[in-house]
Image (tube, rainbow, N blue to C red):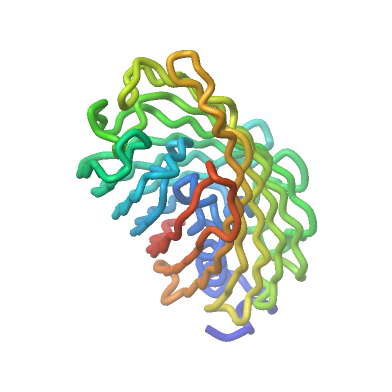
């Protein structure tokens, strides 16, 4: 792919191919929420786009993905395949994207109990995880772009809104210390903010700063492990990414996620376990053709309190785009 396609005002197949490659960069970033949504997740591709994504995720740590609950004595290994579908459209003169996420996989865990530190309980689980439904929309500087207007969009500042609901559809057994499902609903509300530095979204040297402050609210779990009821306060999260295109087919980013809050009560008694954790990572993105793209991310915990998330993860993302 030559830079000519990205700078010269062209029509037909050449422009369409350039936009295909750009969309693979922009839309291959949706991911399971505890790992962050990823760099450039909410830059606007053209409306009426279908994107199919398959994530392969490996996590080691002390918390189930997207559960919001951290168990400091939990030693957990998770292997997941996550299927995602996104559709973009225009509603009331605004850019809107709908996403459906369905994970499945397996986990193994060990947990030690404070009253029996020499005893460790082992757990294995496999099956479906909780289904997620997400909607995002442009609020400022994020118009509904068509193929004809996409190349002229100036990506300086874009502010959006998002809502993600997690449904308790995954495998769950109250006798297990860790499960693929969470047995409760959650609602994440956030505002994606992107600062772009480049001539347009097709600029092969585009640089972006992505920010995503959010809050997640949880319903109660009426069948928690070794208790009758567990409730949780909201969890605040701040995600950031600095990204840069090195050429039309390769880009990279430095990623971070900071989490705070999420203290729980078990059977009405405070667990005194307010979380704090700071995770960092890096992402490499590649485009092999107009339809297929690949992304690799690795991240780990840099700092946390006694009740914060502690672990590392790797994620491989394959994207197929249909315009």
Residue 125 in view in this figure: yes
Q: Is residue 40 above or below residue 16?
A: above
Q: Is residue 19 above or below residue 5?
A: above
List x then y, in percent, for residue 242. Answer: 68, 65
The quadrant in which residue 156 appears is bottom right
Position of 30 with respect to 3 (left or right) is: left
The picture places residue 66, in percent across and down from the top left corner, at 44, 40
Question: Residue at horizontal 59%, vertical 28%?
Answer: 234
Question: Which residue is drawn at the image coordinates 41% and 52% (left, top)?
Answer: 61
Q: Which is more toward the observer, 71 or 217?
A: 71
- Judging depth in this view, the residue of 107 and 98 nearest the camera is 107
Q: Nearer the viewer, residue 238 or 200?
A: 238
Q: Is residue 203 above or below residue 108?
A: below
Q: Report the residue at 50% width, 71% height from top.
A: 285
Image position, residue 120 (x, y; %) = 25, 44
Q: How many marks?
A: 0
Where 310 sits versus 216, above or below? below
> Residue 198 versus residue 48: which sits nearer the camera?
198
Residue in view at x 61 percent, y 37 percent: 162
């Amino acid at each position: 792919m030559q830079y000519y396609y990205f700078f010269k005002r062209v029509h037909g197949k050449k422009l369409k191919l350039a936009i295909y490659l750009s969309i693979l960069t922009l839309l291959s970033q949706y991911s399971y929420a505890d790992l962050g949504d990823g760099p450039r997740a909410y830059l606007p591709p053209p409306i009426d786009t279908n994107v199919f994504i398959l994530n392969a995720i490996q996590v080691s740590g002390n918390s189930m993905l997207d559960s919001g609950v951290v168990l400091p004595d939990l030693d957990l290994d998770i292997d997941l395949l996550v299927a995602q579908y996104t559709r973009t459209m225009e509603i009331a003169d605004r850019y809107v994207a709908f996403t459906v996420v369905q994970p499945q996989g397996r986990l193994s865990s060990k947990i030690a109990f404070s009253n029996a530190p020499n005893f460790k309980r082992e757990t294995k689980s496999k099956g479906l995880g909780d289904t997620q439904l997400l909607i995002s929309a442009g609020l400022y500087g994020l118009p509904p772009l068509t193929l004809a207007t996409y190349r002229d969009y100036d990506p300086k500042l874009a502010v959006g809104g998002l809502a993600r609901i997690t449904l308790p559809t995954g495998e769950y057994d109250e006798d297990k210390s860790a499960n693929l499902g969470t047995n409760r609903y959650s609602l994440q509300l956030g505002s994606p903010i992107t600062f772009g530095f480049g001539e347009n979204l097709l600029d092969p040297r585009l640089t972006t700063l992505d920010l995503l402050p959010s809050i997640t609210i949880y319903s109660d779990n009426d069948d928690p492990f070794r208790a009758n009821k567990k409730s949780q306060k909201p969890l605040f999260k701040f995600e950031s990414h600095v990204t840069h295109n090195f050429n039309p087919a390769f880009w990279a980013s430095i990623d971070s996620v900071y989490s705070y809050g999420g203290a729980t009560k078990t059977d009405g008694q405070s667990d005194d376990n307010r979380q704090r954790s700071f995770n960092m990572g890096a992402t490499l993105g590649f485009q092999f053709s107009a339809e297929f793209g690949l992304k690799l991310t690795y991240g780990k915990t840099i700092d946390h309190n006694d009740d914060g998330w502690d672990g590392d993860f790797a994620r491989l993302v394959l994207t197929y785009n249909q315009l």
